[in-house]
Image (spheres, rainbow, N blue to C red):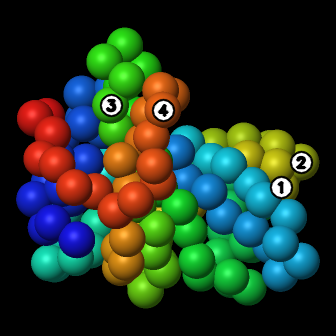
Amino acid sequence: MKTNALDHAAALCRQTGFALLSTADARGTPHLGVAAKLGAAAPGKLTVSEWFCPGTIENLKSSPRVALTVWDKDADRGYQMLGTVERMRDVGVLDGYAGIEERQRLPQVEKELTIKIEKILLFKKGPHTDSEEQETMSA
């Protein structure tokens, strides 16, 4: 894995304004979430921050394996990063944002996930091989 690919992925997320986070529950049922903040952490790790929906958080409690995707659809370039969530911490908490019924449905805590990236694949809609990232992409 090329470590500068993680920096490129974080820069691409800043450019596009989003990353997709795929999780699965204990039975393997997939779930897709969107995050706006992606950052390089320690070597080989990324942080992802967002007001994740309850489904994402519940899935991570039973299965920490994730796929994280950043993609510029206009340029058809991006990365799919496979890894494991090593840490989940609260970075923001709402207090009284909504009524009790709404609080049960809407996220009330912003989480930051630290993900150890184990594999980086190039991601595009055009033909590709799903082999590990081989080339350096400009951000």
Q: In this figure, which residue is indicated by the disc labeled 3?
A: 77
Element type where label 4 sits in the image: loop
| Sequence order check, earlier mark of 3 and 1 | 3
Looking at the rendering, which quadrant does residue 104 occupy? bottom right
| Sequence order check, earlier mark of 2 and 3 | 3
Q: In this figure, which residue is indicated by the disc labeled 4?
A: 127
| Sequence order check, earlier mark of 3 and 4 | 3
Q: In this figure, which residue is indicated by the disc labeled 2?
A: 101
Measured in 3D between alpha carbons, the distance from the residue under mark 3 to the one under mark 4, in whole angstroms, is: 12 Å
**Label 1 sits on what residue type?**
Gln
Residue 58: image location, x then y, percent: 74, 72
Measured along the vertical axis of the image, is residue 9 above or below residue 132? above
Measured in 3D between alpha carbons, the distance from the residue under mark 2 to the one under mark 1, in whole angstroms, is: 5 Å
Q: In this figure, which residue is indicated by the disc labeled 1?
A: 104
Quarter of the picture holding the N terminus = bottom left
Measured along the vertical axis of the image, is residue 111 above or below residue 78? below
Quarter of the picture holding the C terminus = top left
- Are the residues flagged by discs 2 and 1 in contact, CB closer than 8 Å? yes
Residue 30: image location, x then y, percent: 78, 59
- Are the residues flagged by discs 2 and 4 in contact, CB closer than 8 Å? no
Of circles 3 and 1, which is in front?
A: 3
Looking at the rendering, which quadrant does residue 60 occupy? bottom right
Measured in 3D between alpha carbons, the distance from the residue under mark 2 to the one under mark 3, in whole angstroms, is: 41 Å
Instruction: Judge left or right: residue 51 versus residue 58.
Output: left
Crowding around mark 4 (Cα neighbors within 10 Å: few <14, some 14 to 19, many 20+) is few
| Sequence order check, earlier mark of 1 and 4 | 1
Crowding around mark 3 (Cα neighbors within 10 Å: few <14, some 14 to 19, many 20+) is some
**Res 98 seen here:** yes
**Label 4 sits on what residue type?**
Pro
Q: Residue at x 73, y 47 (%)?
A: 106
